[in-house]
Image: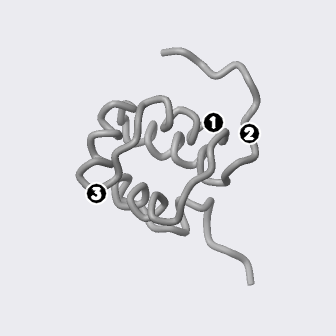
Amino acid sequence: MKHRKDPPGDKNIIGTQVVAIRKAKRMKQKDFLARLQTFGLDISPTSLSRLEGQYRLVQDYEVVAIAKALDVSFEELLGGETEE
């Protein structure tokens, strides 16, 4: 597996959580991409890599599909519960 050399970008806040949750579930990127397709989100491996590296913006409908594909809540995907 190729490791990311550059520091994370600043285009989204879920990228690092997506990687952490995906790896905790021992899911490879290609398997995750297949799951995303079952939830109506068809993105390329390059696009997923850019999303995980926080170099790509994430649309709201993508967040919904990602949370479903990872079987997590929006709160967990966004890094925990929000403070009020």
Rounded to the nearest whole Å, what is the CA distance between mark 2 and mark 3?
26 Å
Say the numbered circle drawn on residue 53.
Answer: 1
Secondary structure at numbered mark 3: loop
- Relative to 62, 39 lies left or right: left
Foreground residue, 2 or 48?
A: 48
Q: Which residue does the numbered mark 2 point to in the structure image?
A: 9
Specify the amino acid type for callout 1: Gly
Secondary structure at numbered mark 2: loop
Q: Residue at x 74, y 84 (%)?
A: 84
- Relative to 17, 39 lies left or right: left
Specify the amino acid type for callout 2: Gly
Could you tell me residue 13's position as x and y percent? 67, 54
Tags 1 and 2 touching, CB below 8 Å: yes
Specify the amino acid type for callout 3: Phe
Could you tell me residue 49's position as x and y percent? 53, 32
Q: Is residue 78 above or below residue 31?
A: below
Among the two numbered marks 3 and 1 on one chain, the one whose residue lies closer to the N terminus: 3
Q: Which residue does the numbered mark 3 point to in the structure image?
A: 39
- Looking at the image, the residue that sits furthest to the left is 38
Among the two numbered marks 2 and 3 on one chain, the one whose residue lies closer to the N terminus: 2
Among the two numbered marks 1 and 2 on one chain, the one whose residue lies closer to the N terminus: 2
Foreground residue, 84 or 44?
A: 44
